[in-house]
Image (cartoon, rainbow, N blue to C red):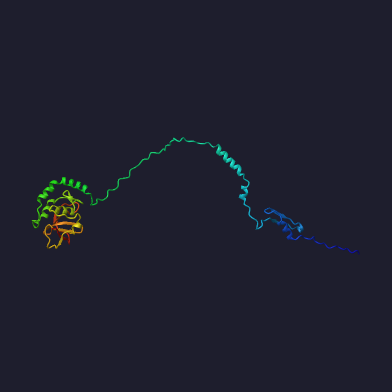
């Protein structure tokens, strides 16, 4: 019998994977690299990667580096040189066209409430108009007015009675129209006594007397108003707008009586 000796088969020595990895790393950075190991049918595919410590690529800078800036400058200069120039004479003028504008006036404002204050001039004019339309009736009233018996002998009350029927006018100081203090100062001036213009100031002149001792011709003062005492609980004064000089009962609750010599 012949002995058959079969030699043992040995596998070919394999290259270690570390060697393949080193070969892949040695390839160009940023490019795809394929490493094929044919031993035992093993295929290793690797993608090249940028090392961690590699500087990033500035793509915008790379693009700019490909542009010829000198050529652009030359083109811009040529365009400016070929552009038409415009000259204007020193005496040239210009006009501005404007469209016609239609202006609609604002509506008239609502009239303000009448304030019981007016200038003396306008007050006198209004007083003259009122006196013109009522001259006859005013004259008849003045003629029929009789000084209260209690005021007989008082020059002040006698003079004051001449102006019964004269209308109240704010700021008035003449027979065309009186306010309360304008009336008293005008009457007292007829006998040579000068009173302050304002009622508040007139309340501080003379001597204060009690109601029981008051005499015709004394002043009667309350805050904001002044009148002349006519005796027998009567007074003569310029009451308020819309009224006229008149004799009437003392309506003030606690008036101050003042005697002015």
Eyeballing the image, is 125 above or below 147?
above
Q: Residue furthest right?
A: 1
Q: Position of residue 216 (x, y in %)?
A: 11, 58
Q: Quarter holding the N terminus?
A: bottom right
Residue 252 drawn at (x, y percent): 17, 60
Residue 257 located left or right of residue 112: left
- Quick check: 172 above or below 82? below
The total number of labels drawn is 0
Q: Is residue 71 above or below residue 250?
A: above
User: In the figure, is residue 231 to the left or right of 23?
Assistant: left
Residue 133: give x, y in percent of width and height. Answer: 16, 45
Q: Position of residue 260 (x, y in %)?
A: 14, 58
Front-most of residues 249 and 169: 169
Nearest to the observer: residue 143 or residue 56: 56
Q: Nearer the viewer, residue 247 or 172?
A: 172
Image quadrant in which you'd find residue 250: bottom left
Q: Quadrant of the C terminus?
A: bottom left
Which residue appears at 57% of the width and 40% of the height? 77
């Amino acid at each position: 019998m012949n002995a058959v000796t079969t030699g043992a088969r040995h596998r070919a020595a394999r290259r270690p994977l570390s060697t393949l990895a080193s070969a892949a790393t040695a390839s160009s950075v940023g490019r795809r690299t394929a490493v094929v190991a044919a031993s035992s049918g093993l295929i290793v595919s690797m993608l090249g990667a940028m090392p961690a410590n590699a500087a990033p690529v500035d793509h915008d800078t790379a693009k700019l580096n490909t542009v010829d800036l000198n050529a652009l400058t030359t083109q811009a200069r040529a365009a400016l040189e070929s552009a038409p120039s415009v000259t204007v004479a020193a005496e040239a003028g210009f006009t501005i066209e404007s469209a016609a504008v239609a202006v609609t006036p604002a509506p008239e404002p609502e009239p303000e409430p009448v304030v019981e204050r007016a200038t003396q001039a306008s007050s006198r004019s209004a007083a003259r108009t009122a006196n013109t339309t009522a001259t006859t009736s005013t004259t008849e009233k003045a003629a029929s007015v009789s000084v209260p018996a209690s005021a007989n002998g008082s020059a002040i009350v006698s003079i004051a009675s001449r102006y019964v029927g004269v209308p109240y006018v704010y700021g008035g100081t003449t027979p065309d129209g009186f306010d309360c203090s304008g009336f008293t100062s005008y009457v007292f001036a007829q006998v040579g006594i000068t009173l302050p213009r304002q009622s508040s100031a007139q309340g501080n002149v003379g001597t204060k007397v009690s109601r029981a001792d008051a005499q015709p011709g004394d002043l009667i003062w309350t805050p904001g108003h002044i009148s002349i005492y006519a005796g027998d609980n009567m007074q003569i004064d310029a009451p308020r707008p819309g009224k006229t000089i008149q004799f009437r009962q003392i309506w003030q609750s606690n008036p101050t009586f003042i005697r002015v010599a």
